[in-house]
Amino acid sequence: MNAFSYRIQGLQPSAIREILKFTADPTVISFAGGNPAPEAFPVELIKELTADILENDPVGALQYSISEGYGPLRDWIKDDLYSKGMFHWQNDDVIITAGAQQVMEMAAKVICNEGDAIICEAPSFIGSLNAFRSYNAKLVGVPMENDGMDINALEDALKKNPRTAFIYVIPNFQNPTGITTSLEKRKAILELAYKYNVLVLEDNPYGDLRFAGEDIPTIRSLDTKGHVIYAGTFSKTLAPGLRVGYMCAENSIIQKAICALQVSTVHTSILSQRIVHQFLTRYNFKEHIEGLQEIYRKKCELMLNCLKYKMPSSIKFTEPDGGLFIWGTLPEGDMNYFCKKAVENKVAVVPGNAFLVDESQPTLSFRINYSTPTNEQIEKGTDILAAVAKTIYK
């Protein structure tokens, strides 16, 4: 007898994780994942830091710790956020989480009652969508334009859904589209949050990976009323396997998040937190970030040039200023058929409907990742992708 809870019955495995099963075949070139570039990991430095921590304070690094997180790391994050206008000492607090994914799950647990609406960009990150689904939230998608959410559609969604818990946005180099939300739209999203008295969950895993254009203030830095919950992570800037992220929010929200953490993971790995803190304080983090930006700038330029000169001109691609992803859109036809033919020819991309609040909705789009494959794989993979495309499109 399988007596699954109502919350879990409707959940399905991540389409991305299912596609990644194909990449176990070493002959398949994967443009499907969202992993940092292997050459981006500071492996030797992490080895050195880990050995030093375990030599000098092994019990402190391996024993239970407080749920809020490692104090010196939290202080570093608060100082960093304060320098960017995102932290107010009198009202705000920070909790360390197991990556930004746990922020999404905790925000839904703490803020959302069953049946409440969560308004999301359409398309949006599948991991967050599934976290929200696990609490029986009503997901409402708002179409993306070239500079972020359609603001008129967002207000219409807020009017139609008075029980909205929060608006979920990825303003910088969005996953999956690579789109950056303009300053004007960030301000508009915040004003609508004030007008309809809802929160904003701002997910910013890629913000430090800008390699073109000018920085745009975060929504949280514009917030004067405590309406923005901010999710940050070191997964894309150090290593996702460390599982260290953080939530910054008004203090009362953080206090409830601590309760939520205590009944799930108790606390984030203290060894990982200490490794991150040591890296931040002993090495030049700004220089490290600049190195990552250069890696991803070159990879993105190579991918975009290959797509531009090899693929049929009728297939359009976004041109991100940072992050890890490009969004392709077919002129017509069957997107799933195109993705299936691609993987049959040993190139994996992600079907766009995996990122919709309703996966049965039609879409002509698909996601490509340029951070994980090597330059040689990018060139070979786009050759194969173009050959598949040219059998269908001109």
Image: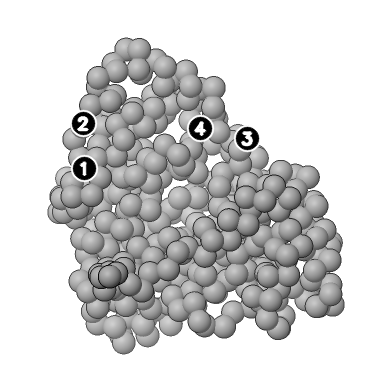
Which amino acid does the dot numbered 4 rest on?
A: Lys
Query: Which residue occupies the extreme front position in the image?
Result: 1
Q: Which residue is mark 2?
A: 64
Residue at 56% across, 44% down: 36
Structural crowding at the residue carrying mark 3, measured as other residues with C-alpha within 10 Å and reported as few (<14), some (14–19) or many (≥20): few
In this view of the protein, can residue 331 be seen by the observer? Answer: yes
Check contact, mark 3 vs mark 1: CB within 8 A.
no
For mark 2, give the secondary structure. Answer: loop
Which is nearer the eye, 327 or 2? Answer: 2
Query: Which percent across, then down, holds residue 33?
Result: 58, 54
Check contact, mark 3 vs mark 2: CB within 8 A.
no
Looking at marks 4 and 2 on the same chain, the residue that comes earlier in the sequence is marked by 2
Looking at marks 3 and 4 on the same chain, the residue that comes earlier in the sequence is marked by 3
Structural crowding at the residue carrying mark 4, measured as other residues with C-alpha within 10 Å and reported as few (<14), some (14–19) or many (≥20): few
Q: CA distance from mark 3 to mark 1?
A: 33 Å
Looking at marks 3 and 1 on the same chain, the residue that comes earlier in the sequence is marked by 3
Q: Which residue is mark 1?
A: 266
Q: CA distance from mark 1 to mark 4?
A: 31 Å
Q: Which mark is residue 39?
A: 3
Which amino acid does the dot numbered 1 rest on?
A: Val
Note whether 227 is above or below 56 in the view shown. below
Looking at marks 3 and 2 on the same chain, the residue that comes earlier in the sequence is marked by 3
Note whether 189 is above or below 38 in the view shown. below
How is the rendered protein coloured?
one colour
Looking at marks 1 and 4 on the same chain, the residue that comes earlier in the sequence is marked by 1
Q: Is residue 71 left or right of residue 151?
A: left
For mark 4, give the secondary structure. Answer: helix
